Image (tube, helix red, strand yellow):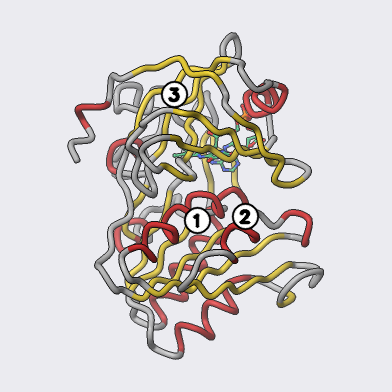
Amino acid sequence: MNIEKFDSRFEILPIKEIIDENPTTKTFVFEYPLGGKPGQFIMMWIPGVDEKPMSVAFDDGKEFWVTVCKVGPASEALHLMKVGDLVGVRGPLGTHYNWGNGDHLALVAGGYGAAPMYFVAREAVKRGCKVEFFIGARSKDLLLYVDKISKLEGVNLHISTNDGSEGRQGFVTVLLDEVLAEGNCDVVFTCGPEVMMKAVGEVADKHNVASYMSMEKYMKCGIGVCGQCAVDDTGELVCKQGPVMDWKYLKKLPEMGKYHRDAQGTKHYF
Ligand SMILES: Cc1cc2nc3c(=O)[nH]c(=O)nc-3n(C[C@H](O)[C@H](O)[C@H](O)COP(=O)(O)OP(=O)(O)OC[C@H]3O[C@@H](n4cnc5c(N)ncnc54)[C@H](O)[C@@H]3O)c2cc1C
């Protein structure tokens, strides 16, 4: 697919359906042939508020979903919207995950990352892949997409929570370490908090398995113009070279797992 071709496409779309996922997360469904691939994102314009990057959580060529956690002004405004309200959508944008037919994938999700990882799993099992799906959250009520993932054939679900209210107590990387030690997985994909993804990359390295991750950096344009999402100290733009990037490259960046920048470019340490 030629991603460049879609860079300037902009549509105003009504929200078709809203699904409450957990106390702070909703999925927004749009009837529109976006053509997004797992790992890609859209720029979503919330009229009068802001335009924000959002990962494609599902796309079957007829409808697509985005799953949004309520954390600040734009996501809160989106959470107040109703079915039929209009938003702007540009995309699909950025790089996507790649795998081979029949591969054995390890997918590691934290936070809203469960949604784009679900899209990977859904497409991968269609192509004869076996999937180990690791999902971690602070507590049971914050776990996302567990019912949807459980329904996918060919997917083994591994759950951990920090407080032990569901699955194994502790970090999801402990479960990943155990499964990778069995030596059956071909590749690791991860989407979640950057500190978690860094730990995932290190566990994958320990077992000599390649890993790729969805980077989240502050974006304003999403198409490589504003330079807001440039990483230290290569200057590469996450909206163009990412968001799906190779850990081999990411682990050399001085900022990886340490800090992110806000709209003004000010550093915030994790
Ligand atoms: C490629 C990409 C895909 C994304 N996909 C999704 C998605 O599918 N679902 C979703 O809910 N969000 C997603 N986001 C994040 C989303 O774009 C917004 O950043 C988020 O909704 C917050 O916007 P806000 O205006 O509500 O709050 P803001 O005021 O922008 O942020 C709220 C709080 O979060 C902190 N914060 C912002 N960015 C980061 C960061 N990178 N690391 C750590 N803390 C940070 C801020 O410091 C602030 O305290 C994605 C971001 C990128 C770059």
Quick check: 234 above or below 106?
above
For label 1, the SS is helix
Identity of the amino acid at label 3? Lys
Q: CA distance from mark 2 to mark 3?
A: 28 Å
Q: CA distance from mark 3 to mark 1?
A: 26 Å
- Residue 73 in percent (x, y) is at 67, 23
For residue 19, what is the image quadrant?
A: top right
For residue 74, what is the image quadrant?
A: top right
Of residues 234 and 119, the one nearer the viewer is 119
Identity of the amino acid at label 1? Tyr
- Residue 209 in percent (x, y) is at 34, 77
For label 3, the SS is loop
The residue positioned 46% from the left and 73% from the top of the image is 154
Q: Which residue is mark 2?
A: 145
Label 2 close to label 3 by CB (< 8 Å): no
The residue positioned 59% from the left and 46% from the top of the image is 269
Say which mark, if any, is on residue 118.
Answer: 1
Give the side of residue 58 with respect to residue 123, left or right.
right
Identity of the amino acid at label 2? Tyr
For label 3, the crowd category at 10 Å Cα-Cα, with few meaning under 14, some 14 to 19 and many 20 or more, is: some
Q: CA distance from mark 1 to mark 2?
A: 8 Å
- Residue 60 in percent (x, y) is at 39, 43
Quick check: 5 above or below 69?
above
For label 1, the crowd category at 10 Å Cα-Cα, with few meaning under 14, some 14 to 19 and many 20 or more, is: many
Say which mark, if any, is on residue 220.
Answer: 3
Label 1 close to label 2 by CB (< 8 Å): yes
- Residue 81 in percent (x, y) is at 68, 21
Give the side of residue 55 with respect to residue 168, left or right.
left
Give the side of residue 249 with respect to residue 152, left or right.
left
For label 2, the crowd category at 10 Å Cα-Cα, with few meaning under 14, some 14 to 19 and many 20 or more, is: some
